[in-house]
Amino acid sequence: MSSSADPHPQPTPASADELATELERVRADNRQLQQALASHAVVDQAIGVLTVLGQIPPCDGFTVLREVSQHTNIKLSQVAEEVLKHGQGAALPDVLIGKLRAALARRAAERPGL
């Protein structure tokens, strides 16, 4: 008994509207990925600044950024940008100074002898 169903059906051609919608979705995804990459680079650079200025190991740098972000309700990427600017000579915003010092002190206390 033979079946009339095509084992390899051909895809239906997409309409111009469907293609335009898909293209916009792909472009939005691309923009989002580019922003994520840029944000990741800033976070990595801020970790380097904290490593030098705070005299902490790199593995603690992200922890410090995360703690400051959580305690100030400021996005981690924004905290990282401010730390990076500070590493280039700018003053830290008042809201970050105390929280950053406290987070660095906690890391130092947890790693005596470093």
Image (spheres, helix red, strand yellow):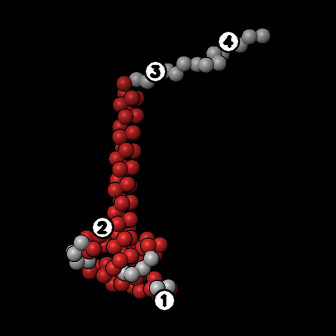
Q: Earlier in the sequence, mark 4 or mark 1?
A: 4
**How far across and down, in percent of the image, does residue 98 sit?**
33, 84
| Badge 4 element | loop
Which one is in front, 4 or 91?
91
> Disc 3 residue type?
Pro
Question: Which label's residue is closer to the chain start, 3 or 1?
Answer: 3
Q: What is the number of the mark on residue 81?
A: 2
Discs 4/1, front: 1
User: Which residue position is annotated with label 1?
Assistant: 113
Which corner quadrant holds the N terminus? top right
Q: Count residues near mark 2 (Cα–Cα under 10 Å), then give few for <14, some for 14-19, many for 20+.
A: some
| Viewer can see residue 17 | yes
Q: Which of 37/112 is in front?
A: 112
Query: In the image, which is nearer the foreground, mark 1 or mark 2?
Result: 1
Q: Amino acid at mark 2?
A: Glu
Q: Residue at x 22, y 78 (%)?
A: 91
For marks 3 and 2, give the CA distance: 46 Å
Query: Circle 3 is placed at which residue position?
Result: 13
Q: Earlier in the sequence, mark 1 or mark 2?
A: 2
Calculate the distance from the C-alpha at mark 4 to the C-alpha at mark 3.
Answer: 22 Å
The residue tagged 4 is 4
Which is nearer the N-term, disc 4 or disc 2?
Answer: 4
> Which amino acid, by three-letter code, is at mark 4?
Ser
